[in-house]
Image (cartoon, rainbow, N blue to C red):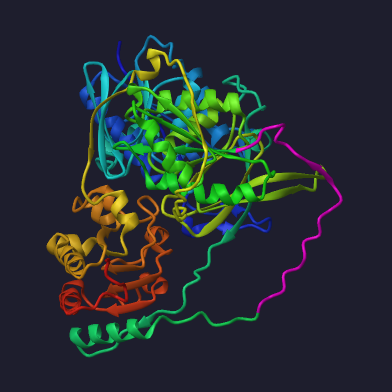
Amino acid sequence: MALTIISLMKQVPLPSEMRMGEDGLMDRTKAKSIINVDCSFALEAGLQLKKQSPDARLIVCSMGPPSFEMSLKKALAMGYDEAYLLSDRRLGGSDTYATGLAIATMIKHLGFSKESSEPFVIVAGRQTSDGDTAHVPSQVAENLGIPQATFIEKADLEDGKIVAKRIIEGGYQMMKLPLPCALSITPTGIAPRRPSLSGVIRAAHSDIKVFNIDDISLSTQKIGLSGSPTIVAKVQNIVSQRAPVIMSEGSDESELVDDLVKNIKSGKSELSKKEKKEKKARVRPDFEVVDFRDGARGILTWAEVADGKITRPSLELLTPARELVKKLDKDTKVVTLLIGGKGIKKEAQTLIEHGSDKVVVVEDERLKEYLVLPYSEIFKRYIDKSRPEIALFAATTAGRELAPRVGVKTNSGVTADCTSLEIGEHIDRKNKKIYAPILESKRPTYGESKLATILGFVCPQISTARAGTFEVPKPNKEAKGEIEEFFVELEEKEFVTEILQTVRGEGGLQNLFEADIIVSGGRPTGEIDNLGLIKELVAALKEQGINAEWAVSRPVVDGGYAQYARQVGQTGKTVRPKVYISAAISGAIQHIAGMKESQTIVSINSNAKASIFKNADFGIVGRYEDILPKLIEKVKDGFTFGVKAQN
C-alpha cells in the first residue's frame, strides 16, 4: 500500500507584535501570523520523504481559527495534496495536553491509527515559537499509541522503515523506527522550498476541509480552557537585572583592549538603588481551601544516564526538589527513578549524596540506552504505584519528549523548560476556592520576552527544568537513603525502535556546564576563519590553567561551522560560567536566554548599537578579527578576566 505522510503545521504570531492584555495574559488577536519556523522544516521533510516514495499521499493538518487556512494554502502550494483544519471555539484555551488529544482524534477520524493497514508517518516541527514546549508531537504519538522520535534532523525511508538522525546532547543518534510513527523535525535540516507558480495556482483552486469537534466525535471533557489539566495563571515582562555596560575607549584595537583589561580589574557597574515600592499586602479571601492532591504525596525526579553516568541536568533537578520539599508536608520525600542497563544501581549512591531520599532502580540490559516507549511505560507503572504529587524532568532532548508522553499516560499536564519552581496557591474567585499547595512552574515564553506562571491541577504536576538554570547540590558523602529495585515486565512492542548508533563528540554538554570561562562566536566567526580565533583564545586560557570552553550562537550551527552540542541559547544550552565572552554575536533575545545567568559578560561587536551590549557588563566596539588577536596576547601575558587558575 502507498505511504501517507501527515504533516502537522501551526500558524504562530510574530513575538514582536504580541501585547499583554489587561488580564495579564497575552493578546495575539492583532499580531501578524506566519507558519511556525520548525513546522516549515517539517513540511519540507515530508516532501523529501515523498521523493523516496513517489506514490505517497501528502496531507497537512492544523488546529486553530479559520485564519490558519492561509498557511494551509501555502502548504498545498509547496506540493501537499490535501489540507485539513480543526477549528472550533470550544478548543480555545487548550493546553498542550488537550491540543495533542484533539489533533490525534482528527488523525484517527481521517482513518489513521496504530491498527491501520495503510502505512503512515507523521512529521511535525520540533516546537512552536509562541510556546516553545516541544510537547505536542509526543502527545499526539502517545494518543495514537505509535512510536516516536523527536529532534530529528534527517529522515529516510529504508525497506519500509524510517531511519532517522536524532540530535542529542553532545552528538547524535541514528535510529530505525517501524511504520506508523511520528517524527519532530529540527530547523537544522533541509531548508523549506518556496512554492512554485503552478503550485500557487493549484492551491488557489483547492479546498481545505474544516472540521469542528462534533465532526470528529471529540467531547469537550478534556479540551479547551476548562478541560485542560494546566492553565496559564499570569504572564509578566522579563526585565534585565544587569547594570549598564562599561564600554572600552581607545583610538585603536590595542588601546581598546588595554581599556577593557583596566575596566575588568576595576569591577562591574552596580545597579542604581531605586526606591523600593511597597508591595500591597495580598488579602487572602475567606474561601474554602481545597487540597486537590487527593492523597498524592512526594516528588519524583528522573535520573537521565549517558555513557553509564548520571547527567548533570538530572543532578541539578535535586536543587529545586529539595526547596519544594521545605514548603510541603513535613514527611515529603524526594524519590528518583534510575533506569539503565545492568550495573546502573551503583549510581544510586550519587543521587542520595546530592539530595534524593530514595532511589528506585530499574535494571535491564535493553534499557542501557534511553528509549521513550519503555521508559515512559516504566514511569507510568511507578506513578500508578507511588502516586507522587510532583514529577520533575530535566529539559534535555530526552526529557522534553519523555515528560509529555508520561503526561498523557497519567492524564497530567506538563510545563516545559522551567526556570523557577515554587509552591504557592491559586485563588479561584469565580468558584470561591483556594487550591493549595500547588506547584507554580515559571517559564520564559514568547521569544524569551515574557515569564509565564503555569499551574497544574492533576497529580503528578509535571514540569521540565531548563538545563543549566539550577546549581548542582553540593554532595554530602555522609547522606543516607533508601535504594529500592523496581521490577517491570516489558513487552517486545516497547522495543520496536532500534538505536543503530550513538555518537557523543568532545566538548559537548558537560564541558559547557562546567567551564569557568566560555568564549562564544557568532556567524562572522565561522565565515571569517572557521572559529579559529575563538578556539585560539580558549587554548590560551587553558594554557593559563583556566577551565575554558568555546561555544556558538545558532546561526553558526545553521551554517555548518559547529555541532549543535556547542549552541548556546533558547534552542541550545543554558550556561552560567564565571565569564562569558561573546564575539560577533548581535544579541538576539533567543541567545541571551542561554547566557544571561553568567556572572560576568564581555561582548565584542562591530555595531555600537548591537543588542548584546544591553546585556553585557563590559563591551568593545570593534571587529572580531582585529580585537581577538590583541586579547589573546593579553591572556598569554597572564590576564584571565579575573578568574583564578585551577590548582
Q: Residue at x 32, y 64 (%)?
A: 516
Tell me residue 59's x, y (percent): 38, 26
Choose between 54 and 406: the one closer to the eye: 406
Q: Is residue 291 magenta?
A: yes
Tell me residue 413's x, y (percent): 58, 36
Q: Residue 179: name its quadrant.
A: top left
Task: Name above or below for residue 160 compared with residue 380.
Answer: above
Range shown magenta: 276-298
Task: Name above or below for residue 209 compared with residue 605.
Answer: above
Q: Residue at x 72, y 74 (%)?
A: 278
Q: Is residue 174 magenta?
A: no
Q: Residue 632: name its quadrant.
A: bottom left
- For the N terminus, the image quarter is top left
Q: Residue at x 36, y 67 (%)?
A: 578
* Visible residue check, residue 133: no
Q: Is residue 28 left or right of residue 469?
A: right
Choose between 7 and 562: the one closer to the eye: 562
Tell me residue 374's x, y (percent): 42, 23
